[in-house]
Image: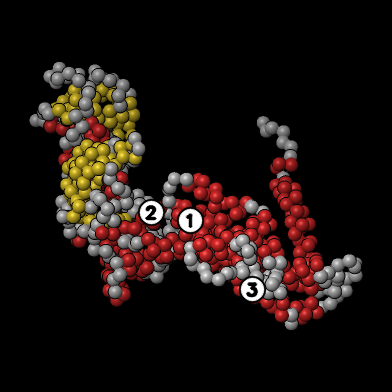
Amino acid sequence: MAGIEIRSLRKHFGDLHAVDGVDLSIRDGEFLVLLGSSGSGKTTLLRMIAGLERPTSGEIHIGDQRVDGDVPPRARGIAMVFQSYALYPHRTVFQNIAFPLEASRTPRKQIEEKVRWAAELFSISRYLDRYPRQLSGGERQRVALCRALVRDPKVFLLDEPLANLDAKLRNTARDDLKRFQRQIQTTTVYVTHDQVEAMGLGDRIVVMERGKVRQIGTPQEVYEDPVDTFVATFVGQPPMNLLDAGDPSLPPRTLTGFRPEHFLPKSVFGSGEDLRTFRFAVRRVEYLGSDRYVYGSVAGSGAPDATIIAKLPATITLGIPEGETQEFAVPRRALRYFDAETGLRRKG
Amino acid sequence: MTLPFRRTLADREDVLGGAMLAPALAYVILLVGVPFAFAIALGFSNATAGSLSFGWAGLHNYRAILSDPIFLRALRNSVVVTIGSQVLVVVLATAAAQVFRATFRGKRFARFVLLLPWAVPVSLAAIAWTWIFDSTFSVINWTLKAAGLLHGWLYWLGDPALALLAIIIVQAWRIFPFATVIVLAGLSSIPQEIVEAAIVDGAGFWRRLFRVELPLLLPVVAVAVLFGVVYTATDLGVVYILTGGGPANTTHVLPTLAFQRGILGADLGQGAAIAVFLLPFLIVVAIGMLRLAHRTEVGGAQ
């Protein structure tokens, strides 16, 4: 059990600053998700914690041990699950899970017990004699988790472990993973580019972009109170609408942001609600079963052609004819303001 | 409206396939198949060079060579040289591949030098080696002597045991570059994440090598060894130039003995019998190795 402290960590590959000055404090037992698109530096950051990559500068502390220098991965008390699972194809499931124990010269009997215990936990006991190629993707993923678990690591490092599963399996695997982490309470750092995964799993989310941390916060904080336009549009699907509303009460060059699910026909709101009304020119309606996405533009805004999206839950059955302009509104409490130049959040 | 359609040669895969295979097939049949069948037939005949007579001799040639101590010695030498050189090759090639996997200054040049033995004609190389093993000028002896490691003198090609060792060294030297290249290719086919998983799992260099990398390399190494076995077991040049089978016929291998009996000694029948003697064994070895390579294929986890 240990927390992780990261101080002004950098990793440069020639001119590329993959990780560009990251400060991060991961609490003991926390499930922390590093969220970013490819090239954001999230995987490099994880690999530096693991010891697979050497930092250009900065410090990493795991528990009370400073590890950024010459401390090899095996001495860091970490376990890692790779995106491809990286199971040893020539070894059976049992031998795969036993490998880290053999490497630490655990007595044979203890290895046997531990492997069986872990396999039981992930209900893969039936497969212990099989080879990885005889398993499905979900089973392989569980073997990889078992292999990580038997080392009793202080920290779990997971690099997109669900990316190779099909969508259906991913939901159950996510649930299993979260339950498992709550049970064993081991500090976990989880890398993903999938914001649904990040929201669903993380106690806190670190949003990264081009080697820098943009925001750290609970899923709710990151979603409700994005610190800048990058986070606002990166988290949430469809992304937050941003427009220059040309509102005279706001300072010049201010972007108004609101989530598609808050942008609804004016008639559905109660009369007591403090609303900001827009004239919404509906271009196209997309019926998705549980929701309707309405694509269009807002007349009188700074960029009248920019696409604005409204997300109407199935409970709103009001007809939205394509090609007509309607009164849509957003509750004022759901509006977020950003500086158009810097992209940073503006209070008010 | 459909365009007028005319079948061209390119549309007729059956004919086209045959036409394209024909040159290669003709080449193999005429230059490999026919002499090969001829050699097998000769082994059962009493044919001699310089005469066109071709009489059926049954198993006479085989009976004759099996009771011939020189043949038995040559057979043993063939086995010793083949196995000895391949063991050396596997160890050296695995080690060299580890070195060449790292990045260092002059890697390209080192790679070029590594491949040289492969590019040099066997005869030229063997002549160079005869000087290295020369009874008077042997650079090995002089070096060992200067380093104070050798007292007395080694007659490399004059002593049967040392001569055999010399042959093993030269054969290993010859196959080694090829094996290294194959092992290097095999190493780069091991997914990086598997190696990293082993590092994170706490495996040090040796455990990674013996428990992860080598088992995954097994199919590739098997192919390299298969080639090495065939090249070495069928090679004539090295032994012929280095020792000529001497001293006193103690270092003959099957190809050199076959050449001596069949061509120089004009007993075509017996020469052929010696030459094809190893064939059944080589076939068994080849099948075994290919099975091994097939069974343990890399990348089963993907």
What is the distance, in whole Å, between disc 3 and disc 2 at their CAs? 50 Å
Among the two numbered marks 2 and 1 on one chain, the one whose residue lies closer to the N terminus: 1
Residue receiving disc 2: B193
Q: Which mark is residue B160?
A: 3
Q: Residues within 10 Å of mark 3 (few under 14, many from 20)?
A: some
Instruction: Using the image, determine if residue A284 lies above or below residue B61.
Output: above
Among the two numbered marks 3 and 2 on one chain, the one whose residue lies closer to the N terminus: 3
Task: Indicate the amino acid at tag 1.
Answer: Ala
Q: Nearer the viewer, residue B113 or A59?
A: B113
Q: Nearer the viewer, residue B251 or A57?
A: B251
Q: Residue A227's quadrant in the figure?
A: top left
Q: How is the image coloured?
A: secondary structure
Residue B104 located left or right of residue A63 = right
- Residue B17 visible (yes or no): yes
- Residue A42 visible (yes or no): no
Residue receiving disc 1: B97
Counting from the top left corner in percent of width and height, residue A315 is at 23, 39
Q: Chain of mark 2?
A: B
Q: Which mark is residue B232?
A: none
Q: Residue at x 26, y 55 (%)?
A: A71
Among the two numbered marks 3 and 1 on one chain, the one whose residue lies closer to the N terminus: 1
Q: Considering the image in quadrants, where does the C terminus of chain B appear? A: bottom left
Instruction: Using the image, determine if residue B214 lies above or below residue A13.
Output: below
Q: Chain of mark 1?
A: B
Please tell me if label 3 and label 2 are on a single chain. yes
Task: Indicate the amino acid at tag 2.
Answer: Glu
Helix, strand or loop under label 2 = helix
What is the distance, in whole Å, between disc 2 and disc 1 at their CAs? 19 Å
